[in-house]
Amino acid sequence: MEFLNISVVLGLFMVAVVSGQDDVQIKHFTGCESAGLCCDAVNNTCYVPNARRIDSTIGQCFCDSRCLQMNDCCVDFEATCKAKDCIMGDWGDWSECSNSCGLGRTTRKRPIIQLPSFGGKPCPTATKEKQSCHGEYGCLQQSVEYSREEIREVGYIIPANFSIYRVSEAYSPQHDIRKNLFFKNFDNIIPRRTAYKALFRVTHAGRGCQKSEWAKVLKKGDQVCVECQPTSMNKRLERCRGHGVFRANTTWKAIEVSHCHGKWEMITHHDQGQLCKLSDHSFVLV
């Protein structure tokens, strides 16, 4: 009797299993889209069994980006898993100079808007740029209250036409490849700061200036443009001595002209990166 009961239970269980098999629906995937597969790089698990390949054969086809090289993609791979190139955003603004008074560094970045996928073009490695800068916003040297050193200095000048900085390509950082040449050859000798200029009004001039062809324009009341160039900058100060103080009288002296010296008032702030227009009234500090 016990054996009979076991047989009946086992028979009912088998019937239930067989009956359950009739309700199971085995879904057949036809490609990457129906299987919901799209994989980047090499992925041996990213495949669809018994589906049509890109070469029109039937079998195990893949949905990873390497399948194009292996020629075993599913037939709908290119339509479903279309390659996406990296998309970069625009460069942002340059940051403030890292040094508020003196030589520093400024940077800018650009964002990655879309990462590459499925074999698309990769993102460039350069997402950040940097360059040297010279901060002046935190300097106290152009405030009369804190500029006693500048006020006491004498600005020694020559005509701008005589400046080697203007006539020698090796010294010019203003154009293309010469900028790199300039910094490479002279980085250990002169500051990396760019040239700057300011306008001065002559308030006094010695009589000896009238004996010189180029210095005779230095007359009381005349306005002159004066440059400070990297080749003349003091390495420690990163500026030219005697470059003036805004709205203050300082002393100047013409090089190799006897008794040609005087006073002038700086009437514009220093204009970084600019040179004076060449004329009889343009000078450089040395």
Image (tube, grey):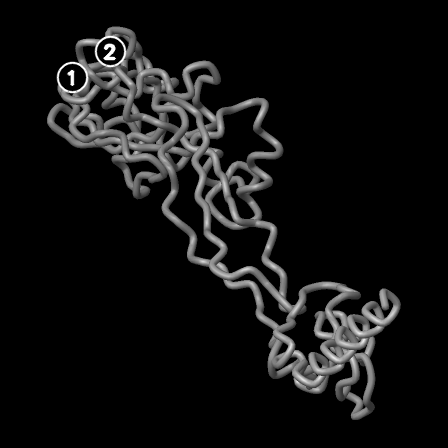
222 up-or-down from 40: above or below: above
Residue 145 location (% of width, % of height) = 18, 9
> Residue at the spot x=39%, y=49% of the render?
92
| Residue behind mark 2 | 147
Relative depth, front residue between 118 and 232: 118
Q: Amino acid at mark 2?
A: Ser
Pointer 1: residues within 10 angstroms few (<14), some, or many (20+)? some
Could you tell me how far apart the alpha carbons at marks 2 and 1 are, in whole angstroms? 10 Å
Relative depth, front residue between 264 and 34: 34
Q: Amino acid at mark 1?
A: Ala
Q: Do labels 2 and 1 touch, CB within 8 Å?
A: yes
For label 1, the SS is loop
| Residue behind mark 1 | 248
> Is residue 46 in view?
yes
Relative depth, front residue between 148 and 166: 148
Assign the C terminus to one quadrant of the image.
top left
Return the residue found at the far left. 221
Return the residue found at the far bottom. 56
Sooner in the amino-acid sequence: mark 2 or mark 1: 2
Relative depth, front residue between 232 and 262: 232
Residue 62 location (% of width, % of height) = 75, 75
